Amino acid sequence: MTRVAIVYHSGYGHTRVQAEAVRDGARSVPGVRVDLIAVDEHDRYGDVLDAADAIVFGAPTYMAGPSAPFKAFLDATAGRWAEQRWRDKLAAGFTNSAGLNGDKLATLQQLALFAMQHGMVWVGLGLLPGNHTSTGSPEDLNRLAGFLGAMGQSPADLGPEAGPSASDRRTAEYLGRRVARMALGWRPAADSTGLAKAVPA
């Protein structure tokens, strides 16, 4: 069975809602098993992450980048990076902040660069921008016009019941389905170059 893992941090519950939407989208694809992993439990799920065909990374955007707990998780994967355990897996990302812009792109860029360091293959959102014409609506998919990953916005003074918006949740579901469908047909080429062994100790 194809496996998709979603590893996320949520400081106040908003990004958890987004992560659950990604999960729901991914598990709507027949033949795909989905594991939702809170970042503070990642140590217990190392084997799950290693076995996944695709890993979706999610973090709130705090102070122009991923939250500190999520950054700590990224740093903790250095051993896996050295062994290139995640090489050729699919990767994708999502983020949430209180501002409509909120510098969410900076977080997605950091997640994508992290995936590239691991030798992963990044999957973008694959949606045209929503709500960008006079006939558009805040209910459009991809209303925040992200391309590198799924973006969400939640009011800073309200709980997760108030955000991310319904359209942001649907956008996250779309990303989950996209990754799962791609993972079903993803078959990394056999590689005998020994690149993983070339990493200095």
Image: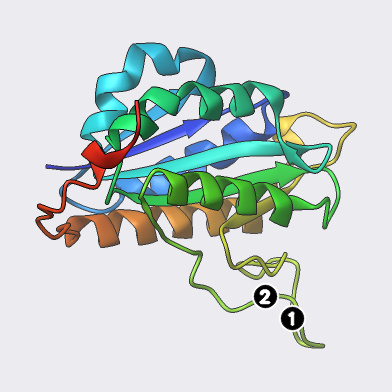
Q: Is residue 152 above or below residue 68?
A: below
Q: Is residue 82 above or below residue 134?
A: above
Q: Secondary structure at mark 2?
A: loop
Q: Is residue 76 above or below residue 23?
A: above
Q: Residue at x 55, y 56 (%)?
A: 170
Label 2 environment density (alpha carbons within 10 Å; few <14, some 14–19, many ≥20): some
Q: Earlier in the sequence, mark 2 or mark 1?
A: 2
Q: Residue at x 45, y 46 (%)?
A: 117
Which residue is the site of mark 1?
136
Residue 10: percent from left, percent from top: 64, 27
Horizontally, residue 67 falls left or right of residue 22, namely: right
Residue most extreme to the bottom: 134
Which residue is the site of mark 2?
130
Horizontally, residue 116 falls left or right of residue 48, namely: right
Which residue occupies the foreground of this view, 25 or 61?
61
Q: Amino acid at mark 1?
A: Gly
